[in-house]
Image (cartoon, grey):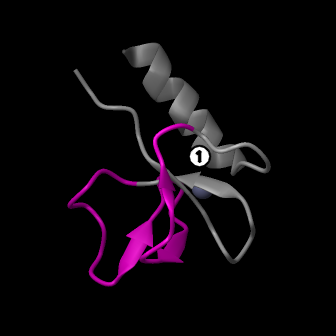
Amino acid sequence: MSRPGRWARSPLDYHAHLLLPEGEHPSGVLKARCGDLMITGLTQHDQPPPGLRCARCHLIFLADASVR
Ligand SMILES: [Zn+2]
């Protein structure tokens, strides 16, 4: 059973991105499923936060949800 992904709001584009699973981030950065890189230490959310959301990450999230 896969765990829902975690989300973080990028300070670069102010969109919420779906993060790669724990342990799959390059060192020193947070990497989103769409490929965007973010600084570490951002607040992470278990649910997509309200507001702008990365369109690519949203589609990946929907695809993941339909597989479960
Ligand atoms: Zn994204």
Q: Residues within 10 Å of mark 1 (few under 14, many from 20)?
A: many
Report the predominant secondary structure element of the magenta stretch: loop
Image quadrant where one finds the N terminus:
top left
- Does residue 17 show up magenta in the picture? no
**Image height of 35 relative to 29, above or below:** above
Question: Is residue 51 found left or right of 36 in the rendered image?
Answer: right
Q: Could you tell me which residue is drawn at 41 percent across and 41 percent down?
A: 5
**Image height of 68 relative to 64, above or below:** above
x%, y% of residue 17? 58, 54
Question: Is residue 62 found left or right of 27 in the rendered image?
Answer: right
Q: Could you tell me which residue is drawn at 33 percent across and 84 percent down?
A: 28
x%, y% of residue 35? 50, 63
Seen from the viewer's position, the closer of residues 50 and 53 is: 50
Amino acid at pointer 1? Cys
Seen from the viewer's position, the closer of residues 67 and 11 is: 11
Give the magenta-colored segment's residue range: 20-47
**Image height of 23 relative to 39, above or below:** above
Residue identified by numbered label 1:
57
**Is disc 1 placed on a helix, strand or loop?**
helix
| Figure quarter occupied by ligand 1 | bottom right
Q: Quadrant of residue 24?
A: bottom left
Q: Could you tell me which residue is drawn at 69 percent across and 51 percent down?
A: 54
**Image height of 37 relative to 58, above or below:** below
Q: Is mark 1 within 8 Å of ligand 1?
A: yes
Image quadrant where one finds the C terminus:
top left
